[in-house]
Image (cartoon, rainbow, N blue to C red):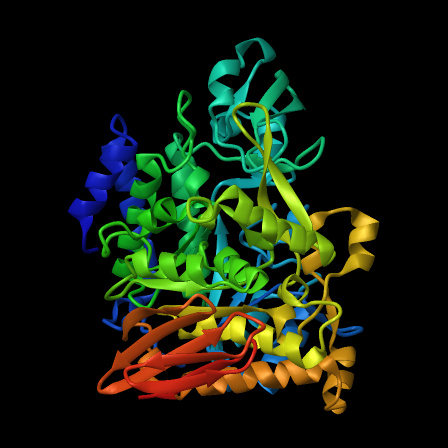
Amino acid sequence: MNNKKKILEKIRLLYPQQAKEVFLRLEKILDKETNLNKTALSNKKFLFDEKDIFLITYPDSFFKKNEKPLTTLSYFLERYLKDYFSSIHILPFYPFSSDRGFSVIDFYKVKKDFGSWSQIKKISRNFRLMADLVLNHVSTKSKWFCGFLLGKKKYQDYFISFLKEEIPEEEIKKVFRPRATPLLTPFKTKNGLRYVWTTFSVGDYTDQVDLNYKNPEVFLEMIKILLFLFEKGIRIIRLDAIAYVWKELGTNCLHRPQVHTIVQLLRLIVQNLYPDGVIITETNVPHKENISYFGDGKNEAHMVYNFALPPLVLHAFITNNSLFLTRWALSTDWPKGDNFFYNFLDSHDGIGVLGAKEILSNDEFEKVFLSIKRNGGELSLRNLPDGGKAVYEINTTWWSALAEKKAPFELNLKKFITSRAISFALKGVPAVYYLSLFGRENDLKTYKKTKINRDLNRENLSIKEVEKWFANKKTKETIVFNALLDLIKKRKSFLAFHPQAQQEVLSLSNKVFAVLRYKNGQRVLALHNVSKDYVEINYRGKKYKLLPYDFLWQII
């Protein structure tokens, strides 16, 4: 095993009193993995190019009567998307108790209702797969938490809990809250009532309980799960809510130095055993904090979710003004070398706003929030230290966020595709959420039943219905689907859209977001009109004309 010295140094930072013992146990785990998988020791590295585009989907986003959803998903991907998407992020497919998969009961199993590991492996043969390592919390139905409730000694330190009289109220108030609920949740255990740390509690009760990484047993368990996912054909590991994993009372318990140490350890382990593996961090936080997970450019995440991009693109189209988007893009230190932004616009969680917190003022955000509410979207709140509340997340489909009800379909389609074109033209690797394949609108029917904001953007689609759309070329869904595939085909044709190609953000007009990309002699000017006006752009002595919400990608 290479990098032993570096790994030991990191472990000393996490567990100074137990470093030698923890290192020896970790070494045994990694040596076992090496013996299991000799092919992992090749020098094959991960590579992305201009042809790489991700699709984000649930395991059961597509369904067919009497068929396992993973089989249906595999069919849909191979039949319709194989030539367009290179990589698939399948959201949690493990047995779970809530939160559409993120309350994991058992990381070593595929939920029976979805299918099996063989179906996951089948998809991995045709696409590069991303899967979630949900590090921060597990389900109350998990073996670990059930053991905690039963008073089993092994599991008492897997979680952070207090007796009522022990709760450090003033220190708890300092903890950053991504939800509008109490941080601690009461549970009846064999040892009496305990108040357990639950970062992502929902409503009056939660079944997602935070893990205690000060206990090295938890860390070692997660390493075993990480390696198991690689054995199953996963090559991209999404570190869900990684920013929260290390708790230190007296602080806001966010981005602690130990969190970065854990990411660095994971990177060392992955590059040692699986050189073609990729670590991606998901941290819905202000932009500067978010990009800190690149580390020094070589020692932490390979990829980082570009959380500033979705709210800024949304703001640009809602206000018909690209000024804030352009300012941000000009001031951002874009990743270099083998680091990449994951350029997404929508996801299973909706649109986080914290990424643009220090870029847009409250007044500018308010313009976005009013527009979203008019279009049938919802706003999810979080608690502030002073007892107030603030918007944490916008819940809507991307189509519903942008489309104007009284505008012609053709204009709404242009706006939708041009917004996508921005995320495709920028330096990084783009991603598309499955509902945007068809321009689906907010799922008001499900939302009215569940009253869960995120359900607006989590509709399951019958494959029979999807193929009915495709049979009629005039359906809205087919038109959007074909327009998006045309955009993908166009992007893949430009070498200058390679993730490592050079990028120059241009300030040409407050109505146009402009960027110049170039590689190996090819220069592509990408102009995106975010306004409802006809615009003429002068660039280097040439005039470029853009219709409302139109875009132009041109070799110059």
Residue 23 placement, left or right of 416: left
x, y percent for residue 485: 55, 84
Front residue (pair 530, 130):
530
Up/down of 447 relative to 139, above or below: below
Image point 27% across, 49% down: which residue? 295
Up/down of 311 relative to 203, above or below: below
Residue 42 visible in the picture: yes
x, y percent for residue 98: 68, 46
Give residue 446's quadrant in the image: bottom right
Residue 237 visible in the picture: no
Residue 277 placement, left or right of 354: left
Quadrant location of the N terminus? bottom left
x, y percent for residue 166: 53, 11
Up/down of 90 relative to 410, above or below: above
Residue 127 placement, left or right of 280: right
Image point 70% across, 49% down: which residue? 453
Image point 71% across, 78% down: which residue? 409
Quadrant location of the C terminus? bottom left
Front residue (pair 414, 203):
414
x, y percent for residue 440: 70, 70
